[in-house]
Image: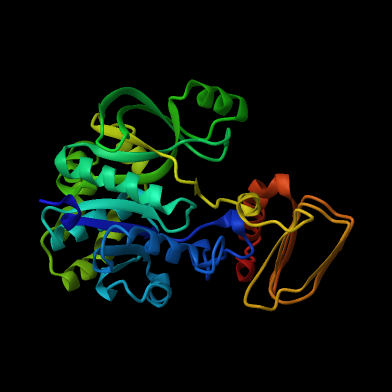
Amino acid sequence: MNHLDHTYAVILAGGGGTRLWPKSRTKTPKQFLKLLSENTLIQQTANRITKLIPWERVIVVTNKKYQKDVEKQLPNVLKENIIGEPQKRDTALAMLVGSLFAKNLDPKAVVINLASDHGVTDEIEFVRVINSAAQVAAESDYLVTVGITPTHPSTGLGYIKIGQDIKKLANSLTLFKVESFTEKPNEATARGFISTGKYFWNANNYVWNVDTLERTFQKYMPEMWQQAKILSGLSIQKFHDQLEDLYEQAESISIDYAVSEKADNLVLIPGDFGWSDVGDWKVVYDLEKKNISGNVVLGEGTNIHTLSIESHNNLIHTNGRLVAIVGVNDLVIIDTDEILMIVPKNKTQDVKKIVTRLKEEKQKEYL
């Protein structure tokens, strides 16, 4: 039996991306933006995984209000495979619901969980590593996470520490026991982590067979499991109809807090395929092509109009208006129809503070 015959992808596309404001907003969260490519981030994600599995085995879990956007952006995904969440409930419920949907289609389902807003530069290596993770998940009772080999001491990501190696896999990859998780450390701690060679970035990139996941939820999240198991064995239409009640009662908790940090059957395969979470405008600057002055110029369509004099290492995103800069360096300038935002490149993590302030001041039209 080929494990890929039973492998599904669950793409999580719930929204968010506040640090990419004002391009990423409630009506157009970052997975629907064209960053790093001519395609949007969610299109890049789906195209990447369909090098491994067919389109009909791609499932998308999104917010109900983005269902039509997903249908438009991913016309090759079956409409019934787009699950609209009635409320935001974080990753534990989203991943469980996506996995139960896959199991209803195939009792032997293996699920690859992917965020819809991450970037990958080496797709061949990505496919190789994910394929290995799917094989391990299909043949064992392990929950597999693909840990990203860190390239710098990031303070914006969580870290996973590995313990002993369990076995060498056929293609020169190694399977490790997971020892512990650490949420977003400070820079000195992150530097120390990286120097040991035992820490990997947590990309929430989990692969499991659904039977194993169900047993894990029964053990560590019995209440959520009881609530969600009403979805088991339902027809597609009834599955969608039951979501309203389930989301009304289920708690909001991340998969890491719910399951991963408690589970004794979690293992890690290192992945080194040019991954990024495209988490803020500085990351976008780092990943995009620079011109001779070190500036990155982005925009919608062909009408990108900028004038730069004695200005270096800036990121400019324009919606068509001329953006002219003289003698400025290391800035992020995002110009949209309604909002102009200017921030130093080393402060882009703080863009979410603007979103928080707008919420406090109830200025919803800018969110």
The type of colouring in the image is rainbow
Q: Name above or below for residue 292 compared with residue 305.
A: above
Name of the residue lying farthest toward the front: 171
**Side of 140 relative to 174 (left or right):** left
Q: Quadrant of residue 240?
A: bottom left
Q: Quadrant of residue 55?
A: bottom left
**Side of 215 relative to 363 (left or right):** left
* Pick the front one: 365 or 136: 136
**Side of 164 relative to 37 (left or right):** left
Residue 36 in picture, x, y percent from top left: 56, 60
* Pick the front one: 125 or 257: 125
* Pick the front one: 3 or 102: 3
Q: Name above or below for residue 71 compared with residue 112.
A: below
Q: Name above or below for residue 270 compared with residue 56.
A: above
Task: Tell me what residue is drawn at x 64 percent, y 64 percent.
Answer: 22
Is residue 328 shown to the viewer in this render?
A: yes
**Side of 351 relative to 148 (left or right):** right
Q: Looking at the rendering, in which quadrant would you find the C terminus?
A: bottom right
Task: Tell me what residue is drawn at x 26 percent, y 60 percent.
Answer: 53
Residue 277 in picture, x, y percent from top left: 51, 49
Task: Tell me what residue is drawn at x 64 percent, y 47 percent.
Answer: 349
Q: Quadrant of residue 203?
A: top left
Total labels drawn: 0
Residue 237 in picture, x, y percent from top left: 18, 73
Task: Tell me what residue is drawn at x 64 percent, y 68 percent.
Answer: 366
Is residue 87 shown to the viewer in this render?
A: no
Residue 200 in picture, x, y percent from top left: 44, 33
